[in-house]
């Protein structure tokens, strides 16, 4: 090499730089192609059609950001949960939250009420899964309607109804969306599980899913359908707040409506494992705790039924870390939970 002239050295350096540039842009366009293919495959699998190419470009960029985020999270070793490129992969987290999360916080006055807790002396077994006891209907899908509160309340009511009558009956969320409108509940624009229980008590029952099927949008109340009662509750109670031990006792006895902060991207793309965050305590989503247990690595979890279809999470369920240091629980799960009573 020492004998090379300056010109030759310069020439070789140029060739080398050119080579690097070519190979980099080649791999970048290959990467874009793969990402494009991924998007096309994802569109086909999810039956997604965009109205024009501008919309497609916009959705592709969001999809790409989400896929990169999901892959970066999944690369972290020892993270107890995985994310997946699910059917929500072309929505930003803001869009996703706006279309699905419709839990309204309890007013301070109501959330600080002192209540008697009927399960205070319950001894909780090591694990519980109400699905195995036949008290949980199949996963439902709220679609783009912020009525999580109705799905949460109905799932808890389906549970207590099965426990008190021995019959598992899928009940109507649409009845709540259409008819429970004189109080704070506002169909697809959000509501509260407690107010749903209140409505069901005053209405003297709730009809079946089959009789009053889910539409995914606000409709006019069918008084006829709402007058046909398939199940009843006699009351509801709030679980003592910020107390995971109390929540555990309640879930030992029946499926319980819980409010959580489901606002983060990790929640949007949760796919499996025990979810350990990220989330805060800005309660915005109503779901149902249908059990609890301990994972193989010793992490305790809540078994939670969601209403985002079966392609999200573990066939529609999420296991959320239980017994964390904060009294509110992970994502605020112990802050505003309640259960209907049947006697
Ligand atoms: C729990 O046990 C205590 C002590 O025996 C009793 O005073 C209380 O009434 C019990 N609570 C319920 C809800 O049964």
Image: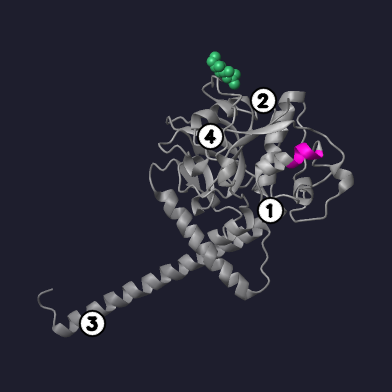
Rounded to the nearest angstrom, the CA distance separating label 4 from label 2 is 17 Å
Magenta span: chief secondary structure: helix
Q: Earlier in the sequence, mark 1 or mark 3?
A: 3
Residue at the far left in the pictured view? 2
Rounded to the nearest angstrom, the CA distance separating label 3 from label 2 is 76 Å
Instruction: Describe residue 167's horizontal placement relative to residue 65 as left or right.
Output: right
Q: Earlier in the sequence, mark 4 or mark 2?
A: 2
**Residues marked 4 and 2 touching at CB (< 8 Å):** no
**Residues marked 1 and 2 touching at CB (< 8 Å):** no
Q: Position of residue 285 (x, y in %)?
A: 59, 48
Marker disc for residue 11: 3
Marker disc for residue 302: 4
Front position among marks 3 and 2: 2
Residue 200 is a magenta residue: yes
Front position among marks 1 and 3: 1
Rounded to the nearest angstrom, the CA distance separating label 1 from label 2 is 28 Å
Residue under circle 2? 133
Q: Is residue 281 above or below residue 237?
A: below
Instruction: Describe residue 114's horizontal placement relative to residue 22 as left or right.
Output: right
Q: Earlier in the sequence, mark 3 or mark 2?
A: 3
Front position among marks 4 and 2: 4
Rounded to the nearest angstrom, the CA distance separating label 4 from label 1 is 24 Å
**Residues marked 1 and 3 touching at CB (< 8 Å):** no
Callout 3 secondary element: helix
Residue 167 found in image quarter: top right
Neighbour tally class for label 3: few under 14, some 14-19, many 20 plus, Cα within 10 Å: few
Rounded to the nearest angstrom, the CA distance separating label 1 from label 3 is 61 Å
Callout 2 secondary element: loop
Marker disc for residue 143: 1
**Residue at the spot x=45%, y=42% of the render?**
276
Callout 4 secondary element: strand
């Amino acid at each position: 090499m020492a004998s090379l002239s300056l010109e030759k050295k310069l020439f070789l350096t140029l060739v080398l730089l050119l080579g690097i540039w070519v190979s980099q842009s080649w791999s970048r366009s290959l990467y874009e192609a793969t990402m494009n293919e991924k998007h096309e495959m994802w569109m086909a699998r999810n039956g997604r059609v965009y109205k024009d190419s501008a919309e497609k470009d916009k959705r592709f960029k969001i999809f790409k950001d989400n896929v990169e985020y999901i892959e970066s999270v999944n690369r972290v070793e020892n993270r107890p949960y995985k994310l997946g490129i699910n059917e929500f992969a072309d929505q930003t987290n803001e869009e996703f939250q706006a279309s699905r999360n419709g839990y309204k916080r309890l007013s301070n006055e109501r959330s600080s009420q002192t209540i008697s807790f009927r399960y205070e002396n319950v001894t909780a077994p090591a694990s519980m899964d109400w699905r195995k006891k036949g008290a949980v209907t199949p996963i439902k899908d709220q679609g783009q309607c912020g009525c999580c509160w109705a799905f949460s309340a109905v799932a808890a009511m389906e549970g207590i109804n099965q426990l008190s009558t021995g019959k598992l009956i899928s009940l109507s969320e649409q009845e709540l969306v259409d008819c429970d409108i004189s109080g704070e509940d506002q169909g697809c624009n959000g509501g509260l599980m407690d107010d749903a229980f209140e409505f069901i008590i005053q209405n003297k029952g709730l009809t079946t899913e089959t009789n009053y099927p889910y539409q995914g949008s606000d409709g006019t109340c069918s008084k006829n359908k709402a007058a046909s009662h398939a199940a009843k509750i006699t009351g509801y109670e709030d679980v003592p707040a910020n107390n995971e031990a109390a929540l555990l006792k309640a879930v030992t006895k029946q499926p319980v409506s819980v409010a959580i902060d489901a606002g983060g991207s990790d929640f949007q793309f949760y796919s499996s494992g025990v979810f350990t965050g990220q989330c805060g305590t800005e309660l915005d989503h109503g779901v149902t705790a249908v059990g609890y247990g301990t994972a193989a690595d010793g992490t305790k979890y809540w078994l939670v039924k969601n209403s985002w279809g079966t392609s999200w999470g573990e066939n529609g369920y999420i296991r959320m870390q239980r017994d964390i240091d904060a009294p509110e629980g992970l994502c605020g799960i112990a802050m505003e939970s309640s259960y209907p009573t049947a006697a």
